[in-house]
Image (cartoon, helix red, strand yellow):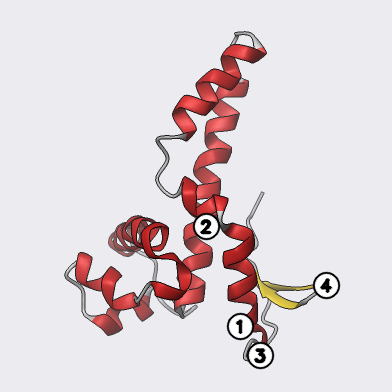
Amino acid sequence: MNKNIKISPKHVKKKDLILDSAVFIFSEYGFYNTKLEQITRSLNLTDKSIYYYFTSKGDLFLEVILSVQNKLDRLIETINQMDTTHIEKIKTYTNKAMTINGLTLLMNIPKSLSTLLCITKSNLTRPSNTRLGQNGFSRVKLMAQ
């Protein structure tokens, strides 16, 4: 994403809509079989407009994974604060986690990320949001804690 873009509430809302659509489409078709055009068409956007929010299909895919993971993390935090038994917490987590869109996408992460790594490894320079892993460069959004 272009670092010089002013982030407005409208920009954030549109980006969130793209992420929501991408979760469904990546979950259904997988990384390889998803076309960015499918996502833009589902939102009545022009094909090139998605690049205003994401630099590539791989960038969008990683943001989708991180957004689903963030939802699961928030769910865990909420459930951990419940004053109930561990068994009840597990039941609650299981029931609520199953309602999070993209959960099936997370189940296929190892295969999807290795695919993505093969695609990006050859053409990825090392900006500040990458880290060197055992298999080469992998793009990772660094999250503020």
Of the image marks 2 and 1, the number of the one nearer the N terminus:
2
| Count of marks, rendered view | 4
Of the image marks 3 and 2, the number of the one nearer the N terminus:
2
Q: Amino acid at mark 2?
A: Ile
Can you identify the residue that label 3 sits on?
Answer: 122
Q: Quadrant of residue 137?
A: bottom right
Of the image marks 2 and 4, the number of the one nearer the N terminus:
2
Q: Residues within 10 Å of mark 4 (few under 14, many from 20)?
A: few
Pointer 4 with pointer 3, Cβ within 8 A: no
Residue 5 on image: x %, y %: 41, 76
Q: Is 3 located above or below residue 30 in the figure? A: below
Label disc, if present, on residue 120 of the rendered structure? 1
Residue 126 on image: x %, y %: 70, 83
Q: Is 54 located above or below residue 78 in the figure? A: below
Q: Amino acid at mark 4?
A: Gln
Q: Residues within 10 Å of mark 3 (few under 14, many from 20)?
A: few
Q: Is 33 located above or below residue 109 in the figure? A: below
Pointer 3 with pointer 2, Cβ within 8 A: no
Going by the image, does 9 lie left or right of 144? left
Can you identify the residue that label 2 sits on?
Answer: 65
- Mark 3–mark 2 Cα distance, whole angstroms, equals 22 Å
Q: Quadrant of residue 19?
A: bottom left
Residue 45 on image: x %, y %: 21, 73
| Furthest-left residue in this view | 44
Q: Secondary structure at mark 3?
A: loop
Residue drawn at the location 35% of the way across and 76% of the way down: 35
Of the image marks 1 and 4, the number of the one nearer the N terminus:
1
Q: Nearer the viewer, residue 79 or 23?
A: 23
Can you identify the residue that label 4 sits on?
Answer: 134
Q: Residues within 10 Å of mark 1 (few under 14, many from 20)?
A: some
Residue drawn at the location 35% of the way across and 57% of the way down: 16
